[in-house]
Amino acid sequence: MISVSNISVSFAHKELFRDISLTIDRRDRIALVGKNGAGKTTLIKVIAGLAEPTSGRVVRSSDCRMGYLPQQMGHAKDKSVLEEALTVFSYLEELHKRMDIITMELSGRDDFESESYKRLMVELNEVTDRLRILSSDNPRGNAEKILTGLGFKQDELDRPSRTFSEGWNMRIELAKLLLSRPDILLLDEPTNHLDIESLRWLEQYLETYPGALLVISHDRTFLDTVTNRTIEISLNR
């Protein structure tokens, strides 16, 4: 799904790391480890497409959906905990509209072997698969299940998210990411704000997650539980 070839990153003429290559395939479980400052977060941002390498390249499958959880984040806090989690489903209507547009365009064409027709078919399949995954479930029930798994009490789900600490809001973002079910989860220190019970729940959830994982964490027990392959980054290497 993702191929990283000989990427290097430098800031202000200082090399952070160089010539890193790796592949991420479906169901891979990869731990990304190294000392602070070695470039783990930068590497995961490059893989996510949120940062550009100084050299080298990253190739992503056209049908690969990535979900990235950074160490720090923010979202509008005027919604309740549950309402904020459910925003991940807000684009279902847009997906339906896009599917209708593609279907209408394809119905009026007969150039079945053209590249543009094939591209539309690929996009239609992607949109259809995405809708199938997200529409076949009970969004509210799944959101409640994941939020309570991450430590929220049932009577807290209707409270405004602004009344919770940054750590608890991180749990909301993690819940949204899990609800979106991307092909690859890119998690940067996901256990930082979790208590023991929530950590154990997340371990169990990730053990059966159908997609790939790339995880940064200082919790070696967590990494041993949810990953089976380790990549270590050393400063300037």
Image (tube, grey):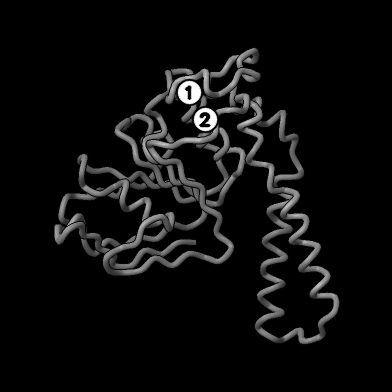
Please name the amino acid that badge 1 sits on. Answer: Trp
Q: Residue 205, can we see it?
A: no
C-alpha span from label 2 to label 1: 20 Å
Badge 1 crowding class, 10 Å Cα cut-off, few under 14, some 14 to 19, many 20 or more, is: some
Circle 1 sits in a helix, a strand or a loop, which is it?
helix
Which residue is at a point 70% across and 59% down the rendered structure image? 127
Which residue is at a point 81% across and 62% down the rendered structure image? 100
Asked which quadrant contains residue 55, the reply is bottom left
Badge 2 crowding class, 10 Å Cα cut-off, few under 14, some 14 to 19, many 20 or more, is: few
- Judge by depth and name the residue closer to the eye, 167 or 148: 167
Which residue is at a point 40% across and 24% down the rendered structure image? 193
Left or right of 145: which side holds 186? left
Left or right of 188: which side holds 6? left
Q: Residue 105, can we see it?
A: yes
Q: Quadrant of the C terminus?
A: bottom left
Left or right of 235: which side holds 211? right
Q: Mark 2 or mark 1: which comes first in sequence? A: 1
**Which residue is identified by label 1?**
168
Circle 2 sits in a helix, a strand or a loop, which is it?
helix
Q: Position of residue 223 (x, y in %)?
A: 37, 36
Is residue 152 depicted above or below 182 in this figure?
Answer: above
- Judge by depth and name the residue closer to the eye, 96 or 184: 96
Please name the amino acid that badge 2 sits on. Answer: Gln
Is residue 96 depicted above or below 7 in this figure?
Answer: above
Is residue 66 depicted above or below 144 in this figure?
Answer: below
Is residue 50 depicted above or below 33 in this figure?
Answer: below
Left or right of 151: which side holds 19? left
Q: Residue 204 carries which label?
A: 2
Q: Position of residue 34 (x, y in %)?
A: 23, 43
